Image (spheres, rainbow, N blue to C red):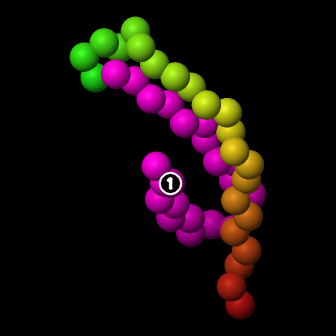
């Protein structure tokens, strides 16, 4: 798995928790924990 991130505004962003769910049995699912943050700085 991977996250594809596109950020155009500088700032601090929290990496969201992962969520997985079985397509045919939605009662089977899992939720992860947030994995940290991404810091975007203005490029001057």
Residue 34's spot in the image, x, y percent? 68, 39
- Crowding around mark 1 (Cα neighbors within 10 Å: few <14, some 14 to 19, many 20+) is few
Height in image: 36 above or below 19? below
Height in image: 3 above or below 6? above
| Quadrant the C terminus occupies | bottom right
Height in image: 44 above or below 33? below
Q: Which residue is mark 1?
A: 3
Quarter occupied by residue 38: bottom right
Query: Nearest the camera: 4 or 24?
Result: 24
Residue 41's spot in the image, x, y percent? 73, 74
Residue depicted at 46% across the width and 19% down the height: 29
Bounds of the magenta segment: 1-22
Quarter occupied by residue 22: top left
Most common SS among magenta residues? loop
Residue depicted at 54% across the width and 36% down the height: 18
Query: Nearest the camera: 4 or 20?
Result: 20
Give the residue at the far top of this rendering. Answer: 27
Q: Is residue 2 magenta?
A: yes
Q: Is residue 15 magenta?
A: yes
Residue 33's spot in the image, x, y percent? 67, 33
Number of callouts: 1
Height in image: 14 above or below 39? above
Residue 28's spot in the image, x, y percent? 41, 14
| 11 relative position to 16: left or right | right
Query: Nearest the camera: 13 or 29?
Result: 29
Quarter occupied by residue 23: top left
Residue depicted at 35% across the width and 14% down the height: 26
Label 1 SS: loop
Give the residue at the far left of this rendering. Answer: 24
């Amino acid at each position: 798995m991977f996250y594809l991130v596109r950020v155009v505004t500088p700032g601090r962003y929290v990496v969201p928790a992962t969520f997985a769910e079985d397509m045919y049995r939605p009662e089977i699912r899992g939720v992860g924990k947030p994995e940290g943050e991404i810091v975007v700085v203005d490029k001057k």
